[in-house]
Image (cartoon, helix red, strand yellow):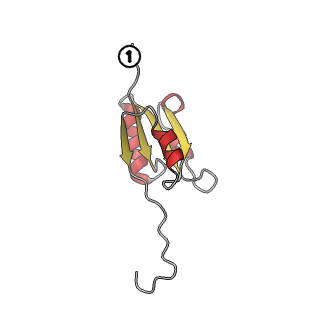
Amino acid sequence: MSEMRRVCVTGAGGFIASWLVKLLLSKGYKVHGTIRDPSIEDNSHLMKLDKATENLQLFIADLFDYNAIKVAISGCEGVFYLASPPIIFTGISNP
């Protein structure tokens, strides 16, 4: 049997990304999902998805950390970029 296709979904804990992860798992993909920080975000819903225990691997990755992203996308044939870095508006009088 051939090896399953592997893709990465950045921001996997987000609303849209969670649905994409669910779809990819249902289509038989292995999914690498990036999350910002498991201690401040509730990403437990991801591991409750069908086939997640076998085919979903979560990576803690800051989008500004090249090495963390490199590890998460290693071995993947595609990347779905749904994450967004935090936007800081302090000091801006008229955003």
Taking depth in this image into account, of 12 and 91 the one nearest to the observer is 91
Q: Residue at x 38, y 16 (%)?
A: 2
Percent of width and height locating residue 91: 51, 82
- Single out the residue that lies furthest toward the bottom: 93
Q: Residue at x 38, y 49 (%)?
A: 81
- Single out the residue that lies furthest toward the top: 1
Residue 19 lies in what quarter of the image? top left
Q: Residue at x 39, y 52 (%)?
A: 82
| Amino acid bearing label 1 | Ser
Q: Secondary structure at mark 1?
A: loop
Q: So how many labels did they put on this image?
A: 1
Image quarter of the C terminus? bottom left
Q: Is residue 24 above or below residue 13?
A: above
Percent of width and height locating residue 7: 40, 36
Residue 3 lies in what quarter of the image? top left
Taking depth in this image into account, of 73 and 40 the one nearest to the observer is 73
Percent of width and height locating residue 80: 36, 45
Q: Is residue 13 above or below residue 56?
A: below
Percent of width and height locating residue 67: 53, 45
Horizontal side of residue 82 vs 42, given as left or right: left
Image quarter of the N terminus? top left
Q: Is residue 50 above or below residue 42?
A: above
- Circle 1 sits on which residue? 2
Mark 1 Cα within 10 Å, few/some/many (few <14, many 20+)?
Answer: few
- Single out the residue that lies furthest toward the right: 39
